[in-house]
Image (tube, grey):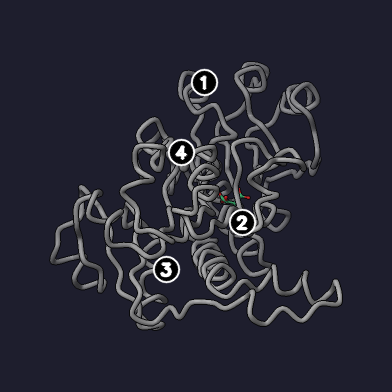
């Protein structure tokens, strides 16, 4: 941004809503990561704002409807942290399959519990989920390398295209019935909220492993806890939570077969550098030349 001609940079991380509403006056562009909330109040206070750029994928911290009403473009970087997030999902899958975090804690407590942590092999197992978007395609590609079968439900993709990606397209109920491991890679929407709930849990394979490094709430976390307690769900890994951070005494977090990380899906140096550069370039191109790339409320130009 500092190299771009005619751009003055005002770097103010960590502003709360009121401070951001104050700071936004006079600004033409705003770049945020996940920590800032661009609410209707902030947008209302923005007298010159033309574009909001999110260095990352999720835009649930931006009131897009309010921005659209004011004619403000909202952009993200849908590919910059996709590999990193896919790798995190695979790390959680390995951790669940081989009890790595639990075994580490046990050894640090001076124990040698070899029998307790017998794991599962992944080769030949079926990995499933809904939606074959950017992140899932990368997950699927890596899972094929591990000799796993990949099944997915995607109402938009053709089976030929899915087959080219090495993925078998099936109905959602067939995903639930076939998958040894389920990972979700969709935004949280009214359609995806509670995708795995009390009705779905009995349809899952006994012992299934669940992974969520997309958005909290895509699984109904209470239903997952009940599934873990009944033994139907073998283990679950969460990187994201409906409220972040979740309460430390959450029974889900405390469950012995739950692995968790504090929303680290996109947290690698490489991904953070990439999304920062991408959003800076996108914003400058928009402010300078009206070029629209990766906007969620404006067609690409
Ligand atoms: C994203 O939406 O880009 C990821 O969840 C990363 C984040 O929000 O920090």
Q: Are marks 2 and 4 in contact (CB under 8 Å)?
A: no
Q: Determine whether the residue tagged by mark 3 lies in a helix, strand or loop.
A: helix
CA distance separating discs 2 and 4: 21 Å
Tell me: residue 43, above or below residue 256.
above
In front: 120, or 40? 120
What's the residue at 42%, 76% (across, down)?
142
Sequence-wise, the earlier of marks 3 and 1 is 1
Q: Callout 3: few (<14), some (14-19), or many (20+) C-alpha neighbours within 10 Å? A: many
Q: Which residue is mark 4?
A: 188
Q: Which residue is mark 1?
A: 66
What's the residue at 20%, 55% (across, down)?
157
Circle nearer the viewer, 4 or 1: 4
CA distance separating discs 3 and 1: 34 Å
Q: Callout 2: few (<14), some (14-19), or many (20+) C-alpha neighbours within 10 Å? A: many
Give the number of the disc on residue 258: 2
CA distance separating discs 1 and 2: 38 Å
- Classify residue 275 as left or right of residue 168: right
CA distance separating discs 4 and 1: 19 Å
Q: Is mark 1 within 8 Å of ligand 1?
A: no
CA distance separating discs 3 and 2: 21 Å
Sequence-wise, the earlier of marks 3 and 2 is 3
Q: Are marks 1 and 2 in contact (CB under 8 Å)?
A: no
Tell me: residue 92, above or below residue 244.
below
The reply to whether residue 157 is visible in this rendering is yes
Circle nearer the viewer, 3 or 1: 3
In front: 300, or 98? 98
CA distance separating discs 3 and 4: 19 Å
Give the number of the disc on residue 158: none
Sequence-wise, the earlier of marks 2 and 4 is 4
């Amino acid at each position: 941004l500092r190299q771009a001609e005619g751009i003055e940079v005002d770097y103010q991380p960590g502003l709360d809503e009121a401070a951001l509403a104050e700071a936004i006056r006079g600004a033409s562009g705003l770049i945020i990561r996940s920590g800032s909330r661009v609410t209707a109040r902030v947008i209302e206070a923005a007298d010159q704002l033309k574009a909001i750029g999110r260095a990352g994928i999720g835009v649930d911290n931006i009131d897009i409807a309010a921005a659209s009403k004011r004619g403000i473009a909202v952009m993200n970087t849908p590919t910059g942290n996709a590999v990193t997030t896919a790798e995190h999902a695979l790390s959680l899958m390995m951790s669940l399959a081989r009890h790595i975090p639990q075994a580490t804690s046990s050894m640090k407590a001076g124990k040698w519990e070899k029998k307790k942590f017998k794991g599962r092999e992944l080769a030949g197992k079926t990995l499933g989920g809904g939606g074959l978007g950017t992140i899932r395609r990368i997950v699927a590609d890596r899972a094929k390398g591990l000799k796993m079968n990949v099944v997915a439900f995607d109402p938009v993709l053709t089976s030929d295209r899915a087959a080219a990606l090495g993925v078998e397209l099936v109905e959602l109920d067939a995903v639930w019935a076939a998958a040894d491991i389920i990972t979700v890679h969709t935004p949280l929407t009214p359609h995806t909220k509670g995708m795995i709930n009390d009705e779905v849990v009995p349809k899952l394979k006994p012992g299934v492993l669940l992974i969520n490094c997309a958005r909290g709430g895509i699984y109904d976390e209470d239903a997952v806890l009940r599934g873990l307690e009944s033994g139907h769900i073998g283990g679950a890994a969460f990187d994201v939570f409906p409220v972040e951070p979740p309460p430390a005494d959450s029974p889900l977090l405390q469950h012995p077969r739950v692995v968790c990380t504090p929303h680290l899906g996109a947290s690698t140096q490489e991904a953070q550098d990439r999304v920062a550069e991408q959003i800076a370039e996108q914003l400058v191109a928009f402010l300078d030349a009206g070029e629209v790339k990766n906007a969620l409320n404006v067609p690409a130009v």
